[in-house]
Image (spheres, coloured by chain):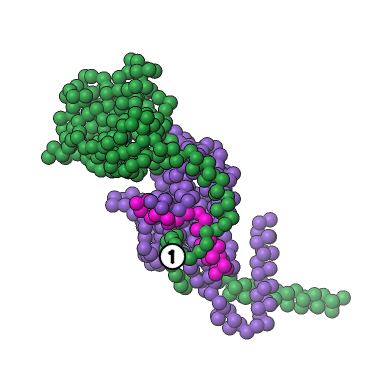
Chain colours: A purple, B green
C-alpha cells in the first residue's frame, strides 16, 4: 500500500514535470534557489520577562514579547521559517517554580515553534513533571537517544521529524546529554541513554538515504565543546557525514557567529549556540539549488 | 479486430514512452537540492532591535506576572554587602552552609532528637547568583536556588567523611560548615570537625540536599551512604524562613571568609 501510494505520488510529481515541459527546459537551470530561514534558541530557562532593569548583566535584554515580535518580523521577510529550541526551557525564574512549564510552552506555541529537544533541566520535576506539561506544547519534542519506552514518556516524544518547506525536505533529529551524575536518578527513572554519536550516525543515514531529505538538522543538548573527550556538538560535527546544522545548548555558549567544522565527507557543518535566557536568537539562512 | 489490437499495442507503447519521459523529467525534478549559500547572524534581543514587543504575548503573560509580583516581592531581610561565591571558600558558600547546618540542627532537635548535625555541605554549582547588597527578597532566593531540592541528613563514618573531604578538596573546595581542612594535591589535609580532629571511628551527621545525596554533581561518596533521614523541607524554604527570622530580629546578613578551607601546599 505504501509503495503504491508512493508511486502515485511520484506520478503526480511527473505530471508537474510534464507541464514544465511546455516551458523551455533551461528553466530548471535558472530556477530561483530555495530559501529556508532557521531561527533557534537554547537554554531559555523560563526567562519570560526581560532581565531586570537592575540586573548586573544583560539588564533589560531578552523577554518573550520582544522575541515574538522579532520572530513575526522575520516571518514577514522570509517565506519559509523554521523555529527550533535546543532544550532547557525549564528552570531559572519563579515563573517555572510557580507555574511549571505551562506559560513557557503556551507562549512558545503562540510563537510557532516547530520543535524542541529535551535538556537535562526538563527532568527537574521528574518524568511526571515533564509528562504533565507536554499537553501545553503545540509542538513536538524530538529526541533520538533517550529510550523512554519503560517510562510514562513512552510514545510522547519523537526520534525525528521531516519538515517540508517550499520544495525542500528538512530532516531533524535530537540528541540529549548523559543524565547519570547530572540529574537525580529518581528524576529520570527508567530512561535509557544511548550513545549520541552512534545515534547521530544512524539518524542522519536514515534521513538521507531512506527519506531523501535535502537538509539535516540536529537539535542537541550535549554542549558545544569540552576539554576532555566528552561527546559534544563539535565532536558530532567532525564525526558525521550528512548533518548540515547542529543547533546546540547546555553549555550556555555565546558564539559570536556559528562555527564551521569539516565532517567525514569533507563538507562544512554549521555548529551554533546562542548563550541562554532568550538573550539571543540564532538566524541561519540556507539557499538551496538543484 | 486485429486492427484494434494493433491500436491498443501502439497505445500501450506510447503510454510506456510517456511514462519513460515522465520518469526522465522526474529524475531532473527530484535531483536533490544542495546548499549553495548560507548566511547567519546571532541577533541580540535588546533595544537595538527596534521591534514593538508583541502585545498578544504581553497580554498572556500579564496575569501570571501579577501573581508572581505579589508573591516574590516580599523583603525578607537586608545584607551589608553582596555575597559572592568562590573557591576554596567564599562569603556566599560559607553563609549558605552555616545556614543549612544551624537550621538542620534545630529541625533535628525538634523532630529527630537522637541526631545532632555536626556538618553541612552545599555545592558551589548549586548557588546560582550572588546575594545582593541591601534588601533581600523572596525573588533573590528563587534566583539563588531555583531547584526544588530537599534537605536530607546523612549518617557518615569518620572514614567516609575523610573520603568526602578528599572529594571536595579535589574539586577545589565547596560550601562547608562545621569543618576545616587544607587542600594539597587534591587531598584534604588536617580535617577538623567541630573543633576536633576528624576521628575515623566516630559517626557524624551531615546536612545537605537530596540532589547531592543522590550522587549529583559527581558526589559518588555521598551516593554510597545508606542511612539517610529526609527532612521534608525544601532547601529554598529553609533559606526563606531563616532570612525572614533575621529580618524580624533586625539582623543583617553578613558573609565572611574565615579560613575554613585553605591552601595547604
- Residue B50: percent from left, percent from top: 48, 65
Judge whether residue A72 is colored magenta: yes
- Residue A223: percent from left, percent from top: 38, 52
Categorize mark 1 by other alpha carbons within 10 Å: few (<14), some (14-19), many (20+). few
Residue at the far left in the pictured view: B265
For disc 1, the marked residue is: B48
Range drawn in magenta: A55-82
- Tell me the chain of label 1: B
Between A53 and A186, the residue placed more toward the observer is A53
Q: Is residue B240 above or below residue B48?
A: above
Q: Is residue A255 above or below residue A179?
A: below
Residue at the far front in the pictured view: B250
Image quadrant occupied by the N terminus of chain B: bottom right
Name which quarter of the figure residue A27 lies in: bottom right
Q: Residue at x 39, y 31 (%)?
A: B244
- Residue A196: percent from left, percent from top: 42, 50
Name which quarter of the figure residue A263 lies in: bottom left
Q: Which secondary structure lies at badge 1?
A: helix
Residue at the far top in the pictured view: B114
Between B77 and A46, the residue placed more toward the observer is B77
Q: Residue at x 33, y 42 (%)?
A: B134
Amino acid at each position: 500500500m505504501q509503495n503504491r501510494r508512493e508511486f502515485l505520488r511520484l506520478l503526480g510529481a511527473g505530471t508537474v514535470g510534464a507541464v514544465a515541459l511546455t516551458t523551455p527546459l533551461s528553466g530548471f537551470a535558472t530556477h530561483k534557489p530555495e530559501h529556508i530561514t532557521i531561527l533557534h534558541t537554547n537554554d531559555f530557562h523560563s526567562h519570560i520577562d526581560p532581565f531586570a532593569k537592575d540586573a548586573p548583566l544583560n539588564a533589560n535584554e531578552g523577554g518573550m514579547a520582544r522575541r515574538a515580535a522579532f520572530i513575526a518580523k522575520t516571518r514577514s521577510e522570509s517565506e519559509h521559517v523554521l523555529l527550533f529550541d535546543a532544550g532547557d526551557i525549564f528552570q531559572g525564574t519563579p515563573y517555572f517554580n510557580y507555574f511549571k512549564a505551562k506559560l513557557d510552552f503556551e507562549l512558545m506555541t503562540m510563537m510557532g515553534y516547530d520543535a524542541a529537544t529535551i535538556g537535562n533541566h526538563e527532568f527537574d520535576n521528574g518524568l511526571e513533571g515533564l509528562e504533565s506539561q507536554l499537553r501545553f506544547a503545540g509542538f513536538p519534542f524530538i529526541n533520538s537517544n533517550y529510550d523512554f519506552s519503560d517510562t510514562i514518556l513512552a510514545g510522547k516524544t519523537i526520534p525525528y521529524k521531516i519538515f517540508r518547506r517550499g520544495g525542500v525536505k528538512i530532516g531533524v533529529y535530537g540528541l540529549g546529554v548523559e543524565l547519570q551524575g547530572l540529574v537525580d536518578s529518581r528524576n529520570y527513572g527508567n530512561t535509557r541513554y544511548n550513545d549520541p554519536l552512534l545515534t547521530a550516525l544512524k539518524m542522519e543515514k536514515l534521513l538521507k538515504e531512506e527519506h531523501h531529505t535535502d537538509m539535516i538538522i540536529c537539535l542537541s543538548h550535549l554542549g558545544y565543546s569540552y576539554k576532555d573527550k566528552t561527546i559534544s556538538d563539535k565532536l558530532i560535527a567532525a564525526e558525521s557525514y550528512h548533518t548540515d546544522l547542529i543547533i546546540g545548548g547546555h553549555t550556555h555558549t555565546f558564539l559570536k557567529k556559528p562555527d564551521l567544522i569539516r565532517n567525514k565527507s569533507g563538507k562544512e557543518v554549521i555548529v551554533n549556540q546562542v548563550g541562554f535566557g532568550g538573550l539571543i536568537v540564532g538566524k541561519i539562512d540556507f539557499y538551496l539549488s538543484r | 479486430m486485429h486492427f484494434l489490437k494493433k491500436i491498443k499495442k501502439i497505445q500501450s507503447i506510447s503510454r510506456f514512452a510517456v511514462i519513460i519521459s515522465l520518469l526522465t523529467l522526474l529524475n531532473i525534478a527530484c535531483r536533490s537540492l544542495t546548499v549553495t549559500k548560507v548566511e547567519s547572524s546571532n541577533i541580540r534581543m535588546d533595544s537595538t532591535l527596534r521591534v514593538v514587543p508583541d502585545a498578544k504575548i504581553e497580554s498572556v503573560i500579564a496575569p501570571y506576572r501579577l501573581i508572581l509580583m505579589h508573591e516574590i516581592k516580599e523583603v525578607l531581610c537586608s545584607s551589608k554587602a553582596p555575597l559572592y561565591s568562590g573557591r576554596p571558600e567564599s562569603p556566599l558558600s560559607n553563609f549558605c552552609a552555616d545556614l543549612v547546618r544551624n537550621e538542620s540542627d534545630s529541625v533535628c532537635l525538634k523532630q529527630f532528637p537522637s541526631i545532632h548535625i555536626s556538618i553541612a555541605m552545599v555545592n558551589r554549582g548549586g548557588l546560582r547568583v550572588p546575594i545582593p547588597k541591601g534588601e533581600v527578597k523572596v525573588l533573590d532566593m528563587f534566583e539563588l536556588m531555583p531547584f526544588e531540592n530537599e534537605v536530607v541528613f546523612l549518617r557518615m563514618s569518620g572514614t567516609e567523611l575523610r573520603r568526602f573531604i578528599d572529594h571536595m578538596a579535589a574539586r577545589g573546595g565547596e560550601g562547608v560548615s562545621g569543618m576545616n581542612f587544607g587542600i594539597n594535591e587534591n587531598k584534604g589535609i588536617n580535617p577538623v570537625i567541630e573543633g576536633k580532629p576528624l576521628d575515623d571511628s566516630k559517626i557524624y551527621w551531615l546536612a545537605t540536599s537530596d540532589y547531592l545525596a543522590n550522587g549529583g554533581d559527581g558526589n559518588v561518596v555521598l551516593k554510597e551512604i545508606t542511612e539517610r533521614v529526609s527532612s521534608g523541607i525544601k532547601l529554598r524554604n529553609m533559606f526563606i524562613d531563616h532570612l525572614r527570622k533575621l529580618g524580624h530580629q533586625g539582623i543583617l546578613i553578613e558573609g565572611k571568609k574565615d579560613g575554613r578551607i585553605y591552601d595547604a601546599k
